[in-house]
């Protein structure tokens, strides 16, 4: 009886092992089928060449212009003619402002870096942790604001941030496991390429320097316009202020997207390397090659995208209000058809723009070295053919990091208010030094934390693009992460990993024979 029982157990284990082997083989075949199907749209490494050079020259020309403005009018914010009425101008105490900005910068860097280390250490619960920390810091923002300056807008903004954070946490809580698997993979890649954090820290420093310089230029130009050193019409004044705003936006995003493209290139190289990198090594060849390619070959594409991708995203989001609906009914059919035609034309134009100008373009630039327009178009084609357009439109990770950066900016602003209350520094000729200190801290904290957290969103985007086009390499080189991501994706988006769901039954005559065989084998295999 004991022998027969042992034989039964042995046979059962043998059958289970055989089933597991067959299941793994079928899964592996499906991965190959998906990758073969994506072969004509997935990215390929481009020859090294400086691309979109025109926009690099335009950016450098703009930068020289800002240097000229700083030399001519920047001193207006520091040295004021004693005969000038103070109510007509903005006067700042330069040393106090610079010192406070630097203290706030150090505070923002330390806090954001500490949060990043905490996220990397607890990757399994990173989204929940980020949301909880956002809610806690929003509460601290409102509480500190009430304690330091209860009669201005600071505590109100903290309370609003708290309400929005709590509401957003309730709305997205069910989607967290899906986002967490992507974040876990991205942060695991960052662990093995920790030097990417050093790149972000360096660009945080550049962002701080640029922000301080820009503030003095802006105030100097404003004072020059007010006291008559620079005489312009009202329309020209609006144009000047608009251009100054674009200048800060463009330069800030160029700095941030250099980090994003560098991280994407680093993740792409890691994706195709088997095994783990050497533990404890901060800098490696992946980061060096990616940073060099970004600063030398792809900087023009970075400048191009930094100027236009943000506005195109805003336009596309607003265009949703004007898209034609098939449910619309109008008595005036002729007028309705005309309006419908205009709406369709507008929507098509916006879609064509967003086909090329989308955030995934930076990922493709970093991974493969495309020009910006080709990068955006290829990224769109990749997700459309993979059937993941809806999936990649989930901005949970980006939104959580943005909220976290805003709240960290608010905390930095409260810290600046505390410093100002203790030291009683004069910052400007405004009679509200607490508000001035808060605004300085808010701007510094928001910009510097965004510069650091972009390495998280960039690593996640690179993981998703590589997962769409090259899943076999991910399975081969990083099996545990591949297993976790595949499981999470199939739970939230059933069938998204299978070729059958990509409607590949309609094979064109140009389809390679090996792909037809692979798909036929897939269709004869039962779903796992």
Image (cartoon, rainbow, N blue to C red):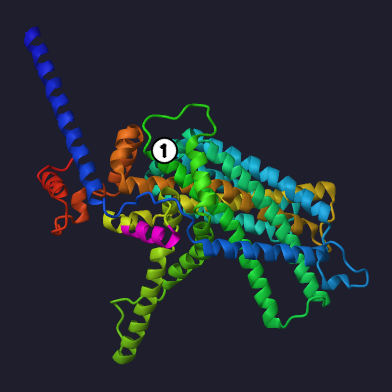
Depth order, front residue of 71/117: 71
| Quadrant in the rendering for residue 323 | bottom left
Depth order, front residue of 439/281: 281
Secondary structure mostly taken by the magenta-highlighted segment of the chain: helix
User: In terms of secondary structure, where does tag 1 sit?
Assistant: helix
Q: Position of residue 173 (x, y in %)?
A: 42, 48
Depth order, front residue of 350/169: 350
Depth order, front residue of 283/148: 283
Q: Position of residue 303 (x, y in %)?
A: 54, 60
Would you name the residue on which mark 1 appears? 270
Q: Is residue 253 above or below residue 349?
A: above
Q: Position of residue 294 (x, y in %)?
A: 51, 50
Instruction: Name the side, left or right, on which 299 lies relative to 485.
Output: right
Whether residue 361 is visible, yes or no, is yes
Near mark 1 (Cα within 10 A), the count class, few <14, some 14-19 or many ≥20, is many
- Residue at horizontal 33%, vertical 58%? 389
> Does the stretch in magenta take in 374?
yes
- Residue at horizontal 72%, vertical 83%? 233
Whether residue 142 is visible, yes or no, is no
Q: Position of residue 523 (x, y in %)?
A: 12, 47
Instruction: Name the side, left or right, on which 331 lies relative to 396.
Output: left
Q: Residue furthest top?
A: 2
Q: Residue furthest right?
A: 83
| Quadrant in the rendering for residue 237 | bottom right
Magenta stretch in the rendered image: 371-381
- Residue at horizontal 51%, vertical 67%? 311
> Does the stretch in magenta take in 254?
no
Instruction: Name the side, left or right, on which 35 lies relative to 122.
Output: left
Quarter of the rendering occupied by the C terminus:
top left
Number of marks: 1
Quarter of the rendering occupied by the N terminus:
top left
């Amino acid at each position: 009886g004991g022998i027969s029982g042992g034989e039964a157990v042995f046979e059962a284990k043998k059958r289970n092992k055989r089933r597991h082997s067959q299941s793994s083989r079928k899964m592996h075949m499906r991965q190959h089928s998906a990758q073969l199907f994506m072969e004509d749209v997935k990215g390929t490494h481009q020859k090294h060449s400086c691309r979109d050079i025109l926009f690099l020259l335009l950016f450098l020309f703009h930068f020289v212009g800002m240097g000229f403005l700083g030399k001519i009018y920047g001193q207006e914010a520091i040295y004021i003619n004693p005969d000038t009425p103070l109510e007509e101008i903005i006067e700042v105490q330069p040393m106090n402002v610079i010192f406070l900005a630097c203290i706030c910068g150090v505070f923002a860097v330390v806090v954001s870096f500490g949060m990043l280390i905490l996220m990397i250490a607890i990757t399994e619960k990173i989204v929940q942790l980020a949301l909880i920390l956002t809610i806690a810091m929003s509460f601290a923002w409102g509480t500190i604001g009430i304690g330091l300056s209860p009669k201005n807008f600071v505590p109100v903004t903290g309370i609003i941030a708290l309400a929005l954070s709590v509401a957003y946490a309730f709305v997205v809580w069910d989607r967290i496991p899906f986002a967490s698997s992507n974040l876990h993979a991205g942060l695991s890649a960052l662990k093995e390429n920790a030097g990417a954090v050093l790149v972000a820290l360096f660009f945080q420093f550049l962002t701080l320097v640029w922000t301080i310089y820009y503030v003095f230029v802006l105030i100097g130009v404003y004072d020059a316009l007010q006291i008559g050193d620079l005489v312009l019409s009202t329309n020209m004044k609006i144009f000047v202020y608009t251009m100054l705003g674009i200048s800060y936006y463009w330069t800030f995003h160029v700095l941030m997207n250099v980090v994003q493209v560098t991280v994407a290139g680093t993740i792409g190289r890691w994706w195709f390397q088997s095994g783990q990198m050497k533990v404890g090594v901060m800098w490696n060849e992946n980061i060096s090659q990616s940073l060099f390619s970004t600063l030398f070959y792809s900087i023009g594409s970075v400048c191009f995208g930094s100027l236009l991708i943000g506005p195109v995203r805003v336009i596309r989001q607003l265009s949703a209000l004007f898209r034609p609906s098939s449910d619309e009914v109008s008595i005036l059919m002729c007028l309705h058809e005309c309006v419908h035609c205009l709406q369709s034309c507008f929507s098509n134009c916006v879609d064509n723009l967003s086909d090329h100008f989308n955030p995934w373009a930076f990922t493709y630039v970093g991974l493969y070295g495309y020009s910006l327009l080709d990068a955006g178009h290829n990224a769109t084609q990749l997700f459309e053919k993979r059937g993941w357009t809806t999936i990649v439109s989930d901005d949970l990770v980006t939104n959580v990091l943005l909220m976290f950066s805003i709240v960290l900016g608010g905390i930095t602003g409260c810290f600046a208010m505390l410093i100002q209350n203790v030291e009683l520094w004069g910052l400007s000729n405004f009679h509200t030094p607490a508000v001035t200190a808060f605004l300085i801290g808010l701007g510094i904290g928001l910009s510097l934390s965004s510069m650091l957290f972009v390495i998280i969103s960039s690593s996640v985007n690179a993981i998703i693009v590589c997962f769409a086009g090259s899943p076999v390499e991910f399975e081969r080189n990083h099996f545990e992460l591949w297993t976790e991501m595949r499981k999470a994706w199939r739970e939230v988006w059933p069938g998204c990993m299978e070729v059958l769901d990509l409607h590949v039954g309609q094979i064109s005559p140009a389809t390679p024979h090996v792909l037809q065989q692979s798909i036929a084998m897939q269709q004869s295999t039962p779903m796992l």
